[in-house]
Amino acid sequence: MIAILLVIWFAAAYLHPPFAKALNDIRILTGFPLGYWLASQGSLVVFVTLIFFYAWYMNNVLDRKYGMDEEDSRTEDADP
Amino acid sequence: MSVTTVTKAEVAAFSAKLRRWYGLFTLGFLIFVLVMLGLEQLGLGRRPIGYAFLLLTLSMYAVIGILNFTRKLDEYYVAGRKVPPFFNGMATGADWMSAASFISMAGTIWLLGYDGLAYVMGWTGGYVLLALLFAPYIRKFGQFTIPDFVATRFAERAKAARITSAVCAILISFTYVTAQVTGVGIIMSRLVGVSYEVGVFVGLSGVLLCSLLGGMKSITWTQVAQYIILIVAYLVPVTFLSQKFTGVPISELMYGQALGAVTDIERDLKLSNYVEPFKQALSNASWIASAKQLGFAAPEPIVNRTFVGAPFEFLALTFCLMAGTAGLPHILIRYYTVPNPKAARVSVGWSLFFIFLLYFTAPAYAAFSRLEVLRNVVGQKIADLPAWVGNWTATGLLTINDANKDGILQFPELTIVADIVVLATPEIAGLPYTIAALVAAGGLAAALSTADGLLLVIATAVSHDLYAKVINPKASYGARFFASRVMIVVAAAAAAFAALPRLALIVQMVAWAFSLAAATFFPVVLLGIFWRRANGNGAIAGMIGGLVTTLTYMALNYTNPNFTVLGLSHLSAGIFGMIVNFGLQIIVSLATSPSPKYIQDMVDQLRIPVGEMSLPATTSAAQTTAPATGGAGGH
């Protein structure tokens, strides 16, 4: 799972800048050049989503897998 | 240190109380801003407004610090372990964001356009690396300063590994804190109206005051307040600007229009295109400026344009900033202050969210500010320029040179040090001075919240890692405490002197610190966690090799931009150090005998990213992490 997330992270951070010049010819939203938008907003949104997803994944999937869900708040069944 | 169990109900009640408190705090602060706006309308002068913001915010930090003063061990070190994830995220946000993020980053984007976005991506993306690769493991390891981690993981060479990493930590933090002091100097010079040099020393006393109050509990709650102030201060002016130019007060969405307008004007004026990537040439301009300030003969200007248009520098800088983020995990102590591991993980998400709020807005700030300057400043008669020009010219950070003597300001005739753009924008845009003072107070909050943590790291590295662990293991607690306090003052004074010549922009100095971290700690921690075979000799060789390579490349490229590989500048020198570090570490580790079995078992156990682990009793977690829990962080 970490590998998949890292691939997404890599794509969001490093795959678009080399093409920024070409991407800038495309306009989106209120007139953002696409290349600029990807670097200034698109990648950031991906990063935040990745981290929240990973927190959710560790709390709900990994802990269960290792039988580590400490205390509280789980009503559904845990089938590892 | 025993884990205090905190029940869910207690946490919920505590959260509700905190929400009420900080809700009132935010409201009170907004009312204060409105009152100041009203008083300004009634004719209150600039100087009193500046002082009011300065004194009010500083005294609030002090009051929160004093109210939370504690002598209980658990509270002192990990804030009683009951900080809810949301608030912990805020505190980490303030910790993380320093003068570089607050006052320098948007200015750099203003100046460089697309190329400045490397900082935005680097400092948020690095957080992903940190959360995915390091945080769960380091949390499990229970060692939160790098020297502690290194000394425990490479226990067979504990002493040498500790000294090497402590020296690296001191160098990195020192570079970093110098940048903060520069920021404080600039803010003070404007807010109080003194020269930059005096501002540095005035601001420094503020830093010292904060860091001597100490204690994780008070620091955490002060930082929550600092986060609120700095984010309010950042969002208010840019929202005004967005409203002014587009009629819609959501700057993050609307600055697309501003970008369009900026590029149109630039085309008409035949200036370089703001959104076009990779147009930075390598030059030694900042070396020339610093040499002049230091009183040396100015070196020949060199500009190397060979690599304009190539993406290597942008990518390398982004990567150095990311790896550096992950290589500075003293921020991780934060995740020990929340009630349980689940909360810790959610807390990482919240902290990035709060950081993201500012980083998401920075390019908008830059775009609107640039539009304002291009549309309403450039093309004016120089004699008619409003008062802010004179005020900033007095600090020496803004110069106007009417090169063609036509009395009208052309864009190339205006030289603004990028570090003042955020501070000057409210005035440039004709907003009330209260807004300008608000921004300055926000910048001060950002610089202070980071600087005191960094000074603590330096002090800890010296008093704990070098003095108590190596030089005089029998030192009493009193002696260590004293050594640590003395070091804070010494480090602060040294940073002030280092800040005087302004070697580079604030973000650039911070980029050096991140480059150094990327070249020294990132590979060591990464291999330490994921490669069982990595041993003490390898780690020590790697850190030294990485440090030396990076410093050498930095010095050579900084003074002579013709010395470059693929157009990489001194800012991203860390990439070479990182390669050398990885290489040396692997070669030396394989050439020497593996670590003892118990360490290898420890690494195996560490790799399962959940649960707790028991460490061999080489260091007690409480003792080793304790003095460093100032939680230095960001930039």
Image: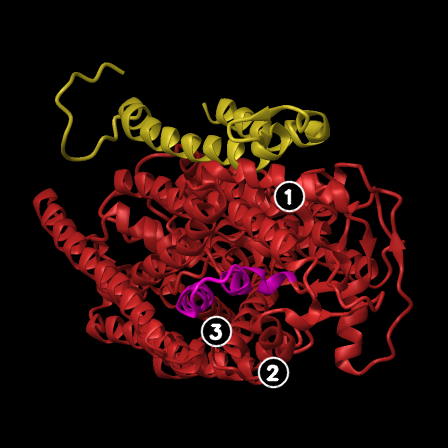
Chain colours: A yellow, B red
Q: Please name whichever residue, B343 or B259, is drawn nearer the observer in this view of the structure.
A: B259
Residue B399 x %, y %: 71, 71
Q: Can residue B333 be seen here? A: no
Crowding near pointer 1: few (<14 within 10 Å), some, many (20+)? many
- Amino acid at circle 1: Val
Q: Residue at x 46, y 40 (%)?
A: B252
Residue matched to label 3? B459
Q: Is residue B421 found inside the magenta-colored segment of the image?
A: yes
* Residues tagged 2 and 3 counted as in contact (Cβ below 8 A): no
Q: Which residues are magenta?
A: B418-447
Q: Is residue B140 left or right of residue B502?
A: left
**Badges 3 and 1: C-beta atoms under 8 Å apart?**
no
Q: Nearer the viewer, mark 3 or mark 1?
A: 1
Residue B354 inside the magenta-drawn segment = no
Badge 3 amino acid? Ala
Circle 2 Cα neighbour tier, 10 Å, few/some/many (<14 / 14–19 / ≥20): some
> Which residue is identified by label 1?
B262
Q: The disc labelled 2 sits on which kind of residue? A: Glu
Q: At numbered mark 3, what does the secondary structure look like: helix, strand or loop?
A: helix
